[in-house]
Amino acid sequence: MANTLSGRFLILTVIFVMLAEVFIFVPSVARFREEYLLARLERAQIASLALLATDGMIDEALEVELLENAEVLNVVLRRDAVRQLILSTDQMPMIAQSYDMRDPAPWVLMRDALARMVNPADEVIRVIGEPVREAGLLIEITMPTAPLRAALIDYGLRILALSAAISIFTAVLLFIAVRQLMVTPIKRLVTSMTRYAEAPGDAARIIRPEGHVLELRDAEEALHKLQTDLTGALRHRERLAQLGEAVAKISHDLRNMLSVATMLGDRLEASQDPAVQRIAPRLVASLDRAINLTEATLAFGRAEEPAPKLTRVSLRGLVEDVFENERLGDDSDKIAYSCDVAPALALRADPEQLYRVLANLVRNARLAIAAKAGDGRIHIAGRDSEDGWEIEVSDTGPGLPQKALDHLFKPFHGGVRKGGSGLGLAICAELIKGHGGQLELIRTGPEGTVFRICIPVGLAA
């Protein structure tokens, strides 16, 4: 039981109640001792009245009986400055201590009560008090301490027994309340977590918040949200896995088809037609890139994405190659392409991967400008930086939609244009990350969009 929440709460409740009773016990015992002594003073005063009624003429046997009934040894009642009545036995014992009960301080009463309980010696004490109903100036008695100590111990034991009974009863009630209000809901929470962990993809196992305690209700709602999000993420991941398997199968067949197209392109290169001779090399190069892309897709599907093959790349030549391919589009006459890259600028990167990144960004920009149904401009600038190289791709398109901004660089969450999958930017960000760099959106809006590619020389070198 000590290892359970309710069991520990039960033990702590008993301990705390008993500690509280200690603070009640000491004043209670002090109060009992005070009342005990005052009662002996009152009895002694009544006994002395018998002496007053007989004008001091009582026999020895009656005097002894009066003292025994009052449970005292001697009585002195001062009526005025000169008169006093005395009841006494033949023996006058030695007085161990004297106590003045006329106006004692609370802490003095508690100190004397505890001292009497722990002192087993049977002593004779003097007690001084005021007579009841102002029947005199002062009353003084002597009495043995053994009966007082026995009464104090008996009273203390009864107080402790009552305290123990109250603490146990209170603890049991609190134990039942804690089990109903806290332990049972917590067990339900743990059971729900265990049951959900067995099949996190099963939405029927998601907890339904039903707690009545505010804190437990908050915990159940937080767990409900966590389980809901996790189930959604697992389903999304499962769909991505299925999609990846489908893409791998398609890429495998597409690679075979592109191989046939490459062989046909090689034959076209042998043509004597000047237009064919001008276009055929670019067609073959595009087919080679498509084959490399399908092979990379197959490798990615096997979680074997190859690391970038770093080499010195002329950035200007790569940009002009991208622009030349994009100019083959139907809307090329409406878009101006400009390059601000020094001819001598060379950076260490994988040429095929960097080409894919730039081609994807430029193609997105071209399609965005075409969707605006107007003229536009695409500009690429490259420069050395303190940490490596920076490439900026800007356009004068309509800017990215809010959906694309909310899920930028996340695959299958909506593309930058209608009908897009959002996979292109995610691939670009992944390729640049493989270079140790970063692809970031600088700004976007009605005046256009700017992306920046940062490749650090330390990581790329």
Image: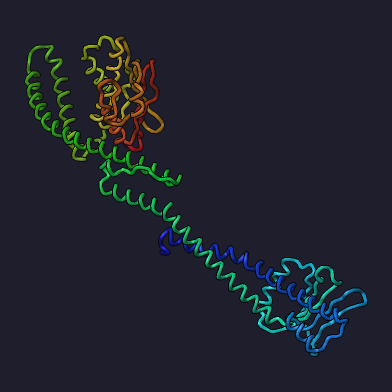
Q: Quadrant of the N terminus?
A: bottom left
Camera sees residue 202: yes
Q: In the displayed structure, would residue 396 be above or below residue 261?
A: above
- Image quarter of residue 290: top left
Camera sees residue 312: no
Q: In the displayed structure, would residue 60 be above or below residue 76?
A: below
- Image quarter of residue 245: top left
**Percent coordinates x, y for residue 320 in the rendering:** 26, 19
At a point 73% along the width and 83% down the height, the residue shown is 68
- What colour scheme governs how the chains and residues are painted in the rendered image of this protein? rainbow
**Percent coordinates x, y for residue 361 in the rendering:** 29, 23
At a point 10% along the width and 24% down the height, the residue shown is 262
**Percent coordinates x, y for residue 366 in the rendering:** 28, 17
Q: Quadrant of the C terminus?
A: top left
Looking at the picture, tell me which residue is in the foreground, 221 or 378. 221
Marker count (numbered): 0
At a point 82% along the width and 75% down the height, the residue shown is 139
Q: In the displayed structure, would residue 168 be above or below residue 369?
A: below
- Left or right of 330? Residue 449 is right
Looking at the picture, tell me which residue is in the foreground, 373 or 26. 26
Q: In the displayed structure, would residue 38 be above or below residue 246?
A: below
Looking at the picture, tell me which residue is in the foreground, 402 or 248. 402
Residue lying at the far right of the rendered structure = 82
- Left or right of 241? Residue 27 is right
**Percent coordinates x, y for residue 230 in the rendering:** 31, 41
- Left or right of 444? Residue 428 is left
